[in-house]
Amino acid sequence: MRALIFGIAVAAAACGGKSSSGGSTPQAGGTCASAGTNIATAMPDLDDAGMTQIANGIAEICAQDAWSADAVGCFANAANQDAIQPCSDKLTPAQQESLGTQMTAGTAEEEDPMADEPEEPAMDDSELEE
């Protein structure tokens, strides 16, 4: 599962990706929030909380890194994962790296099986003597 998500993160952030659909890439319209949501939606096997976390993280780095309107519109309007891949060509190398880091970090937190388990309370000496 982690390899699949990492592969999607790399594909979304990779240079030179081409759409296998052969269609044109959307060029205008959208916000960082809609771009983040669209990218997260294309990632398989995420629950709603994980999708929201990744979408919010991507929206944040989109704004921080000042993605161009062309890049934001491309990501926000891409119809599927294949259409998302060429959108990364509209990002600078630094923006691509930041996107990949965000997606990988978000999915690592999502998949941590220990993250949802409560910690066991420490035993005190009185419990040991019984």
Image (spheres, rainbow, N blue to C red):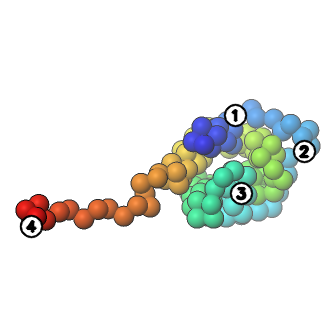
**Would you name the residue on which mark 3 appears?**
41
Indicate which label's residue lies in the foreground, 3 or 2: 3
Which residue is outermost to the top? 16
Q: Earlier in the sequence, mark 1 or mark 3?
A: 1
Residue type, label 2: Ser
Indicate which label's residue lies in the foreground, 1 or 4: 4
Cα separation, mark 1 vs mark 2, equals: 17 Å
Residue situated in front as seen by the camera: 46 or 24 = 46
Secondary structure state at the residue bearing disc 2? loop
Q: Earlier in the sequence, mark 1 or mark 2?
A: 1
Secondary structure state at the residue bearing disc 1? loop
Which residue is outermost to the front? 130
Residue type, label 1: Cys
Secondary structure state at the residue bearing disc 3? helix
**Would you name the residue on which mark 2 appears?**
24
**Quadrant housing the N terminus:** top right
